[in-house]
């Protein structure tokens, strides 16, 4: 399970203006803001952006200046893979260390959508025991009980992170993960396709 919300794409105007700096071609810029405040790339600017995108990393530096922020909720096993993308990405997460005992454990807090019925029954037993430990910790503040929770917590536990990255990051992520066996990566890559000018600048197929 993976969910994305509160997405914002920023700095497209400045990034495209900067792409014209090497040739001092600012007078050819034809982009504009529409009535909804969206920045629309004109024919000239979009053509330049696409040529630079296809020319390779040395030429498409402007894409590092198109920033994206989004709230992603995903299981810990997915986050372990996302964390391989360190350069140019920043994430603020909800804290399992500080807040894991603040609310009752519930099966909705875990990614279980691919589990068989038998595994779901085992999972529910584990969640019930985690809830028992949580209540025990609240009563006793015993650090050993807290460690029991932290070390027993399954990697299917969902965590929300507010992530900031750029279009160059997304080029690398999309093309490395679009055929991954984890369905969560397919959900993420399908979402990337919906970003402004993703087809022209990120997907580029």
Image (cartoon, rainbow, N blue to C red):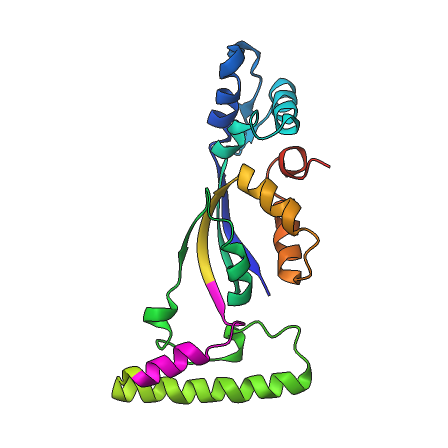
Percent across and percent down for residue 57 are: 57, 30
Horizontal and vertical percent position of residue 114: 66, 73
Query: In percent of the image, x 53 and y 17: which residue is there?
Result: 20
Q: Is residue 30 above or below residue 33?
A: above
| Bounds of the magenta segment | 144-159
For image coordinates 41% across by 89% down, the residue present is 132
Q: How many marks?
A: 0
Q: In which quarter of the image is residue 78?
A: bottom right
Residue 74 coordinates in the image, percent (x, y): 53, 63
> In the image as oriented, which residue stretches furthest toward the right?
205
- Camera-nearest residue between 148 and 113: 148
Q: Nearer the viewer, residue 3 or 61?
A: 61
Image position of 100 with respect to 191: above or below: below
- Above or below, 178 against 148 in this view is above
Q: Is residue 200 above or below residue 95?
A: above
- Left or right, 138 with respect to 117, comes to left
Q: Does the magenta stretch include residue 148?
A: yes
Give the quadrant of the N terminus: bottom right
Q: In which quarter of the image is the C terminus?
A: top right
> Does 198 sit left or right of 161 as displayed?
right
Residue 194 picture location, percent across and down: 63, 44
Q: In which quarter of the image is residue 140?
A: bottom left
Seen at 60% across and 40% down, the residue is: 171
Asked if residue 161 is among those painted magenta in the image, a careful observer would answer: no
From the viewer's perspective, tell me whether residue 118 is left or right of residue 133: right
């Amino acid at each position: 399970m993976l969910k994305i919300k509160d997405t914002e794409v920023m700095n497209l105007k400045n990034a495209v203006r900067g792409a014209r700096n090497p040739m001092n071609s600012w007078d050819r810029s034809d982009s504009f803001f529409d009535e909804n405040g969206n920045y629309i790339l004109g024919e000239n600017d979009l053509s330049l952006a696409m040529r630079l995108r296809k020319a390779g990393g040395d030429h498409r530096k402007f894409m590092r200046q198109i920033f994206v922020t989004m709230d992603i909720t995903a299981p810990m096993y997915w986050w372990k893979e996302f964390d391989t993308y360190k350069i140019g990405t920043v994430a603020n997460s909800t804290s399992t260390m500080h807040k894991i005992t603040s609310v009752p454990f519930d099966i909705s807090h875990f990614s279980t959508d691919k589990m068989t019925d038998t595994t779901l029954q085992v999972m529910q037993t584990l969640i019930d025991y985690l809830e028992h430990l949580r209540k025990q910790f609240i009563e006793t503040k015993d650090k050993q009980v807290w460690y029991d929770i932290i070390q027993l917590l399954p990697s299917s536990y969902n965590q929300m992170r507010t992530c900031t990255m750029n279009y160059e990051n997304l080029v690398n992520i999309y093309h490395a993960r679009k055929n991954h066996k984890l369905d969560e990566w397919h959900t993420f890559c399908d979402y990337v396709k919906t970003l402004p000018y993703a087809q022209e600048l990120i997907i580029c197929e």
